[in-house]
Amino acid sequence: MLFRLVLVGNVEAALQAYPARYELLQQRFNTLLQLPFMHYRLSTTHYPMLITLKYPKSLSNLHMNLTLNGLFVHGDSSYLPDYSHS
């Protein structure tokens, strides 16, 4: 019973913090949308907070450059290299 009370308390605390965390996430997302390479963005309706870019080979190291500047992005999924040839 004590475990359930702790679990419920933890969920309640997380939910109370959610609005502020979501606002910060939304601000960061909006900042990303202002970056100069967002015209390479592919639209999606499935995941509104996910950004997929299809950029030319001249920017092939973009995800590594962004990481070096403190913006951690994922560019190593197995489907991404295949997708880039379409």
Image (cartoon, rainbow, N blue to C red):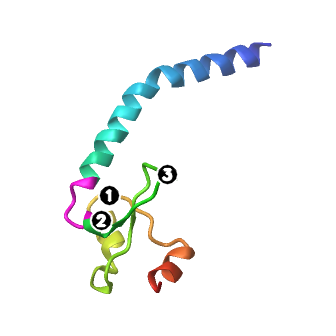
Q: CA distance from mark 1 to mark 3?
A: 19 Å
Q: CA distance from mark 2 to mark 1?
A: 5 Å
Kind of residue at disc 2: Leu
Which residue in the protein does label 2 denote?
A: 66
Between residue 45 and residue 62, name the one nearer to us. Answer: 45
Q: Quadrant of residue 79?
A: bottom right
Q: Residue at x 57, y 18 (%)?
A: 12
Residue 83, percent across and down? Answer: 50, 79
Residue 42, percent across and down? Answer: 39, 66
Q: Is residue 36 magenta?
A: yes
Kind of residue at disc 3: Tyr
Residue 32's place in the image compared with 80, above or below, is above
Whether residue 49 sits left or right of residue 37 in the image: it is right
Question: Farthest residue toward the right?
Answer: 1
Q: State if disc 2 and disc 3 touch (CB < 8 Å).
A: no
Which residue in the protein does label 3 denote?
A: 47
Whether residue 6 sits left or right of residue 34 in the image: it is right
Which residue in the protein does label 1 denote?
A: 71
Residue 61's place in the image compared with 3, above or below, is below
Q: State if disc 1 and disc 2 touch (CB < 8 Å).
A: yes
Q: Residue at x 52, y 25 (%)?
A: 14
Q: Start and end of the magenta stretch?
A: 33-38
Residue 30, percent across and down? Answer: 28, 46
Q: Earlier in the sequence, mark 2 or mark 1?
A: 2
Q: Main secondary structure of the magenta part?
A: loop
Q: Is residue 74 magenta?
A: no
